[in-house]
Amino acid sequence: MNDQLEKNLSRFISLSKSEGESFFQACTYRKLKRKEFLLKEGEVCKFTSFILKGCLRYFYNVEGEEHTGQFFFENSWYTDYESFLSGNPSQQNIDALEPTELLLIQKQDLEKLYDLNPKIERFGRLMAENAYMGVRKKNENLLNLSPEERYLKLIKERPKVIERVSQHYIASFLGIQPQSLSRIRKRISENR
Amino acid sequence: MNDQLEKNLSRFISLSKSEGESFFQACTYRKLKRKEFLLKEGEVCKFTSFILKGCLRYFYNVEGEEHTGQFFFENSWYTDYESFLSGNPSQQNIDALEPTELLLIQKQDLEKLYDLNPKIERFGRLMAENAYMGVRKKNENLLNLSPEERYLKLIKERPKVIERVSQHYIASFLGIQPQSLSRIRKRISENR
């Protein structure tokens, strides 16, 4: 068993040693270099990934521009859940912004675990509920907050993004040009 | 057991007669008149509802205007899932657009059923996954389609809305004025 995975799963469900081992056995290890892709648009996302180390980002290609959707760091899960659930080709690109290490679990293997163990089924329910809450929260931020307000929220709630992610990716996430982000940062530092 | 509920559940899971009965026993029957509220903003949504008959709608109050989010008819489930999951006060208003009959199940009773029966846990997972897909699809439509395209999609995919819901609620759902909807309808009928 992997310690990080064990600790993460224990936040959701309480598995015995052998149950944890079965989960871990269903995972495969994957290493990505910086800028390497985990998924490209048009591919079906058949796995979910647990990040051991590093940083994943997803983005959409919109008329030749990258629109960054979100950043994920060690000890969190990410998949293009829509493609994962529907089996439709993904519209997302997922790449690594740092050298990244992952545990991947394939959809078919996760479904076998759902059948075998109601605790894993519960884990699946809680992950689906979290994904739902995530997408609702993201929408609300996009609808109700200005880029500057979203940047302030990022500083407060997700300091890792500020510390570890390049300015131009943060600008892309906020939906603004890097120059606009510089102006926002200047304004904030002057007001402190 | 209620026939409609039984048929609906069987689309997701296969319950024995007594398991189905336990689920049904956890439900309470509720009747709403037209325009009666099931939930008002500021209340916590502590239940999910299965519609036996009629039509529910949810809307947000935005600066004194009703912004209609969606319509739901007999044999479908609806809850403000965000408030239901988080326990935070809802920003939604849910009302009945027709005389409506519901089966409600309280969150605490559903959670007891999750504990008792892994099949119900699976039902919970599938509902969470559906809710996720629903919100993703809704966002994509809002982002990528014009009001006219969304109206055409409604005609094609959800004819019940066209048949049973008043024009001014449909206009509110499309985010346009009733006069604009009249123009769209005229244009469409001329082009057929």
Image (cartoon, coloured by chain):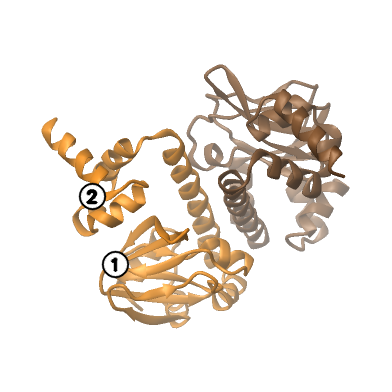
Chain colours: A brown, B orange
> Which quadrant holds the C terminus of chain A?
top right
Q: Nearer the viewer, residue B103 or A19?
A: B103
- Are there few (<14), some (14-19), or many (20+) residues within 10 Å of tag 1? many
Answer with left or right where residue B89 lies relative to residue B51. Answer: right
Q: Is residue A158 visible?
A: yes
Which mark is in front, 1 or 2? 1
The residue type indicated by label 2 comes to Pro
Across and down, in percent, residue B82 comes to 56, 61
Picture residue at 56% right of the left edge, 71% below the top: B117
Label 2 resides on the chain identified as B
Q: Tell me what residue is drawn at x 52 percent, y 50 percent.
A: B132
Q: Secondary structure at mark 2?
A: helix
Q: Position of residue B152 (x, y in %)?
A: 26, 39
What number of labels is visible? 2
Residue A23 falls left or right of residue A110 = right
Query: Which residue is at a point 84% across and 33% down the rendered structure image?
Result: A164
Q: Amino acid at mark 1?
A: Leu
Which residue in the protein does label 1 denote? B97
Q: Secondary structure at mark 1?
A: loop
Report which residue position mark 2 lands on.
B159
Q: Residue at x 11, y 33 (%)?
A: B190
Report the residue that reaches farthest toward the top. Answer: A64
The chain identifier of the residue carrying mark 1 reads: B
Residue A69 is tagged as none
Q: Residues within 10 Å of mark 2 (few under 14, many from 20)?
A: few
On the image, the x and y values in percent for residue B156 come to 25, 42
In the picture shown, does residue A96 fall above or below B94?
above
Horizontal arrangement in the rendering, residue B142 relative to residue B170 (left or right): right
Q: Quadrant of residue B70?
A: bottom left
- Where is residue B57? Give x, y as percent: 36, 63
Give the image quarter of residue A14: bottom right
A158 versus B118 height, above or below: above
